[in-house]
Image (spheres, coloured by chain):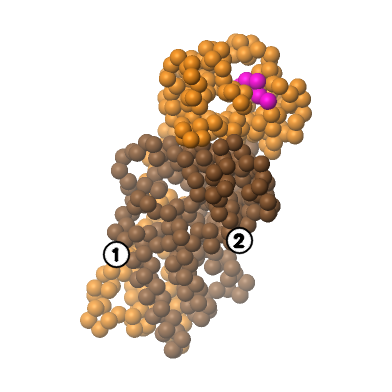
Chain colours: A orange, B brown
């Protein structure tokens, strides 16, 4: 919900961010510009803008919600409770029964939400911006909040570890073939020092095994080496 | 880094989002509009915009980086590796030694990063937008990524997993030399298909940059290639 937004471009930007992250119920409360809906609609935001509701007063807008979250930069003086970092917001909705109708409020561009608005909020979240430049652009703030909510909803996922392969990791035996082939090429190329071969080969194997090659990587490199081997033999 | 941005307002918005989350090194690569810097600077973004660097070409911009991350909506057809969800990005930089110079690339508004740009990226991340409306506004995409990076930095989590470098990661420019050398060898070896060279070279670059080579690795492989090059020339 955008409370008293001034710039129709920001309304369009908010709608686009919502569409990007799968939210569709935009409410615009008492916008300054009566023609906000006709404003050039941002790419992809058309449907969200078209379906947006408008109300004159905040209580009307949130009447049917059971959980209202306010957003702030945390710089308001009269805030009577510490805002929760946005990064922790995502633990809050989980406490709610499913299908709870919730709303997130964003204030006017210049002032942010006023204390009156905040008084309707069960929770106030702060986007963790720097002290030097705390105030976010409205459309960007909406994007960050939508992202965080979508992220949390999507989350329970296996923990990411290291490099992500679209192709499964190569088995050691195919890597060994790769290294054998490389060794043959290097023998022909005179790479190894007379007595150093075993140690150099060991280094090479360590290097190759350490790379975490995928099956696909190993195939491509095998092709490269085969071609070089052929060339050296032919030459 | 913004690659070929068209709209100066988006550059200003990106600068503001960076300032909001404590990032200050903006690089603008070959912007369409030469007066981008003079464009009405977004609130709070003045310092970041003023200090922004501009380059004509991407390799120049990332030459001194050791970790380059590309961003995508995941809808590009030719992407030969699965992009990592942004929510998982934050496990990747932790593999790097502290003070690694990293960059995040954002593509032009209309097309996003092209395959040539992506081939310089060690990792491609996808902002988890919906299928129905995948494409984000540039300024909002930057805001979401800055938020996610700041969020992760604020929450140092469990120990890093994955490959541990004993030697610092190689910079893009030394990897580019390595790839040039490999291309010379492969030209001589007749590896490339008549019309396929650009695409094959792109694949090779992606593969090599994806390996996370250390400085030491790059030196060893450079030596290997030099020897092979010499042999093929001599043969």
**Residue A59 can be seen in this image:** yes
Residue A5: percent from left, percent from top:
66, 24
For the residue carrying disc 1, how many other residues have a C-alpha within 10 Å: few (<14), some (14-19), or many (20+)? few
Residue B40: percent from left, percent from top:
66, 41
Same chain letter for marks 2 and 1: no
Of helix, strand and loop, which one carries label 2? loop
Q: Residue at x 68, y 25 (%)?
A: A6
Subunit under mark 2? B
Please identify the quadrant where the N terminus of chain A is shown.
Answer: top right
Q: Is residue A89 above or below residue B85?
A: above
Q: Is residue B105 above or below residue B220?
A: above
Q: Of residues B12 and A27, which is closer to you in this image?
A: B12
Q: Residue at x 38, y 67 (%)?
A: B218
Range covered by the magenta-colored residues: A1-6
Res B55 → quadrant: bottom right
In this view, the mark in front (2 or 1):
2
Q: Is residue B73 left or right of residue A220?
A: right
Q: Of residues B41 and A171, which is closer to you in this image?
A: B41
Residue B139: percent from left, percent from top:
60, 41
Q: Which mark is residue A206?
A: 1
For the residue carrying disc 2, how many other residues have a C-alpha within 10 Å: few (<14), some (14-19), or many (20+)? few
| Location of mark 2 (residue) | B56
Q: Residue at x 26, y 69 (%)?
A: A202
Q: Of residues A223 and B183, which is closer to you in this image?
A: B183
Subunit under mark 1? A
Do the numbered discs 2 and 1 sit on residues whose CB atoms are within 8 Å?
Answer: no
Of helix, strand and loop, which one carries label 1? helix
């Amino acid at each position: 919900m955008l409370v008293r937004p001034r710039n129709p471009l920001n309304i369009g930007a908010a709608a686009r961010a919502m569409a990007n992250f799968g939210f569709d119920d935009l409410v615009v409360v008492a916008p300054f510009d009566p023609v906000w809906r006709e404003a050039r609609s941002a790419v992809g935001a058309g449907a969200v803008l078209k379906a947006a509701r408008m109300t004159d007063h905040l209580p009307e807008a949130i009447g049917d919600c059971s959980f209202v979250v306010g957003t702030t930069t945390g710089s308001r003086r009269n805030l009577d409770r510490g805002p929760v970092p946005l990064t922790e917001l995502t633990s809050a909705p989980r406490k709610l029964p499913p299908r709870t109708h919730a709303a997130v409020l964003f204030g006017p561009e210049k002032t942010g939400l006023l204390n009156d608005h905040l008084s309707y909020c069960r929770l106030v979240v702060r986007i963790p911006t720097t002290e030097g430049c705390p105030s976010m652009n409205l459309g960007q703030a909406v994007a960050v909040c939508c992202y965080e909510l979508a992220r949390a909803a999507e989350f329970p996922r296996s923990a990411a570890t290291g490099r992500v392969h679209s192709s499964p990791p190569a088995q050691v035996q195919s890597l060994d073939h790769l290294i054998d082939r490389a060794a043959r090429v290097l023998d022909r190329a005179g790479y190894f020092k007379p007595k150093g071969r075993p140690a150099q080969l060991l280094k090479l194997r360590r290097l190759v095994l350490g790379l975490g090659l995928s099956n696909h990587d190993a195939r491509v490199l095998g092709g490269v080496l085969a071609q070089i081997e052929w060339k050296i033999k032919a030459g």
